[in-house]
């Protein structure tokens, strides 16, 4: 039992009864200073009174750790994107609304356009302007825009074979392998490089490579040779046949001479024996 003027709290402690402070649950040692307020109310430190944590219309539960923030809204309403209001957010694909029927953040994979969430259902379209109009097509497709595109939908049409990307007329802008993958002028045909390990060459000189495929290095002569091991000047596949200075050939790889860099070349059978000193 607690004495008169005090109340038993849930932790079995007697506390002064807060009869003069509306919405106060616990006054601690001073009945004029509240330290714990009722649900949806927060303690005002300077006065010791209880104030609404959030005076937000249709807010069911306020966040008592931050003033002006709602935690849950009444049935049928949703929190705004900043939790400062309760709004009717019935937009398909919308995560958070900023106000009624105005989406602020759409779900992943859904595009936000004019405060609405647009799902891109056009085949082979990467970016939609709305449900009927595509802005960017996927690889190997070109945007087909009708003459009267205001009332008609745009679509992505397949480029001509073997295009990786194409111009509006369908001719290749970039070709797919095994053809050279450099940019082409409109209506230019795809062509093969003479070196099968070359991925980029010019049509005027298909025998001179500009870019080699992986595992091959471009030489200064415009040819592709297999990528050699470290410190190797020439190789057959991945086996080195000639090493650079300061190294000797050992089982298809290059090892350092014992006295390098004073020794420029050394004996493969005795790497401590220098054959050419600096």
Image: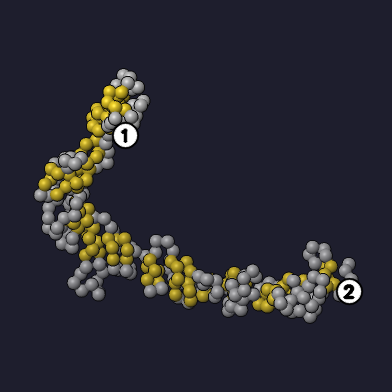
> Which labelled disc corresponds to residue 84?
none
Q: Which scheme is used to colour this image of the protein? A: secondary structure
Residue underneath mark 2: 4
> Residue 256 in the image: x percent, y percent?
34, 28
Residue appearing at x 20%, y 69% in the figure? 146
Which quadrant of the figure contains the C terminus?
Answer: top left
Closer to the N terminus: mark 1 or mark 2? Answer: 2
Q: Is residue 95 visible?
A: yes
Task: Give neighbour class at mark 1: few <14, some 14-19, many 20+ (Cα, 10 Å).
Answer: few
From the top left corner, tell me how far across and down residue 185 is, in percent.
14, 58
**Where residue 156 sits in the image (x, y, percent)?**
24, 61
Against 232, residue 250 (above or below) is above
Residue at which label 1 appears: 230
In the image, residue 20 sits, relative to residue 145, either above or below, namely below
Give residue 1's quadrant in the image: bottom right
How many marks can you see? 2
Residue 60 visible within the image: no
Closer to us: 272 or 110 = 272
């Amino acid at each position: 039992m607690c004495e008169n003027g005090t109340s038993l709290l849930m932790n079995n402690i007697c506390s002064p009864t807060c009869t003069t402070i509306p919405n106060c649950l616990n006054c601690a040692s001073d009945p004029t200073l509240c330290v714990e307020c009722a649900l949806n109310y927060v303690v005002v430190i300077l006065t010791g009174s209880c104030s609404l944590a959030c005076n937000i219309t249709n807010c069911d539960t306020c966040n008592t750790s931050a003033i002006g923030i709602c935690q849950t809204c009444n049935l049928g309403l949703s929190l705004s994107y900043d939790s400062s209001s309760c709004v009717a957010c019935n937009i398909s694909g919308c995560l958070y609304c900023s106000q009624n029927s105005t989406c602020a953040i759409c779900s992943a994979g859904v595009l936000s356009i004019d405060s609405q969430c647009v799902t891109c259902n056009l085949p082979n379209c990467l970016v939609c302007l709305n449900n009927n109009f595509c802005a960017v097509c996927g690889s190997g497709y070109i945007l087909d825009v009708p003459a009267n595109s205001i009332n008609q939908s745009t679509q992505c049409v397949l480029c001509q074979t073997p295009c990786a990307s194409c111009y509006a007329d369908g001719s290749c802008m970039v070709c797919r392998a095994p053809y050279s993958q450099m940019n082409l002028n409109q209506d230019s045909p795809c062509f093969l490089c003479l070196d099968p390990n070359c991925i980029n060459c010019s049509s005027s000189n298909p025998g001179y490579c500009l870019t080699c495929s992986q595992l091959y290095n471009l030489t200064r002569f415009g040819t592709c040779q297999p990528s050699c091991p470290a410190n190797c000047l020439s190789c057959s596949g991945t086996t080195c046949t000639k090493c650079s200075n300061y190294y000797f050939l050992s089982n298809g790889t290059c090892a350092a001479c014992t006295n390098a860099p004073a020794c420029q070349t050394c004996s493969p059978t005795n790497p401590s024996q220098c054959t050419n000193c600096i």
